[in-house]
Amino acid sequence: MKRMLVSLLVFLGVILSGCGKTTDEPTKTSSESSEQKIETAETTSQSETSRSSEVSKASEDVGGVWKATGKEDGISSTWYFNRGQLVVNYVYNFSYVVAETKDSNRYTVVTIKNNEGKTHALLLKGNGRKFEGITVEGEAYDKYLADGTVPNGQLIEFTFQQNAWGSMDEVIDFWEKTYKNADNEASKEIAWENYQRDLWGLVKNGTSGNTITLHFTNISGAGGSYDQFVKNDETTVITSFDGNASFPNNPTMRYTVQNSDYKVIKTEELWKH
């Protein structure tokens, strides 16, 4: 009996010892596994945070003036993005919103709405001062919203235009602020009672890049004058043509104006030459 008890105790001891070892191993492994899970979770969290950060920074800065050229037809137009307002070819107005994140195809999505409330998208890829884009309209836009399908349309190359004019309103504002600046001698030349802002019109022949030409029709409807604006980094040169017949070969006056305060720093009486 004593021998049996000893044998039983030894057996139980071996089993308990074995159980202990068996228990220790999984516990240790479980601990390591937990540490690995924590590390994996942290890594995953960091990865997701990194991806989230990357996505949150995905929106591109599209502000400013861009030359848009179709890669197939070579036709160009001017697009001016300015704080939610888009002006195409200086006079056609739209509103726009840039998505905060890129879509599933890695496009920056610019949603554009016209004055009638119709909406379409401009999908952009690129960075800095050059993008490639594609417009999505009509049924293609509905399908894009439904499943992200990007149509096989013509690619448009967008190139940033330094010192370019974006809209007629921008130029008219510059002209008005220059001629209303009492420090300028030219401010005495305008009879403001005969001035109406809507009498300005765009002259396509003479407008490109940093140069824009406008025609002002006299309030009587008879005759008018031209003004050409050339924007540089710090100054803008305004060349005036009195009378319809004087443009483009017989300029009258030229003013060099500081962009910062609309102060005329140089006056040239070209009509004397």
Image: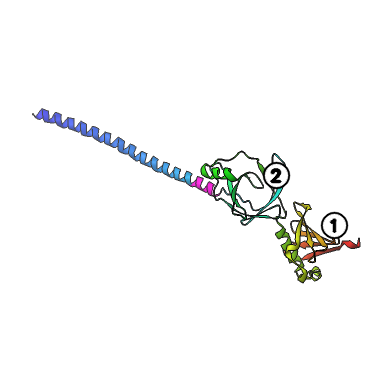
| Quadrant in which residue 86 is drawn | bottom right
Magenta-colored segment: predominant secondary structure: helix
Across and down, in percent, residue 168 comes to 72, 58
Q: Residue furthest left?
A: 1
Across and down, in percent, residue 189 comes to 81, 69
Q: Which numbered disc flags the more N-terminal residue, 1 or 2?
A: 2
Per the model, the C-alpha gap separating discs 1 and 2 is 29 Å
Q: Where is the C terminus found, in terms of image quarters?
A: bottom right
Residue closest to the eye, 221 or 218 = 221
The amino acid sitting under disc 1 is Phe
Q: Is residue 51 magenta?
A: yes
Quickly name the residue at label 1: 247
Alpha-carbon neighbours of circle 1 within 10 Å: few (<14), some, or many (≥20)?
A: some
Left/right placement of residue 239 relative to residue 110 reads right
The amino acid sitting under disc 2 is Thr
Residue 271 at least partly seen: yes
Circle 1 or circle 2, nearest the eye: 1
- Which mark, residue 69? 2
Residue displayed at 61% across by 54% down: 116
Left/right placement of residue 129 relative to residue 37 reads right
Left/right placement of residue 128 relative to residue 203 reads left
Q: Is residue 108 magenta?
A: no
Residue closest to the eye, 46 or 195 = 195
Q: What span is colored magenta in the figure?
A: 49-57
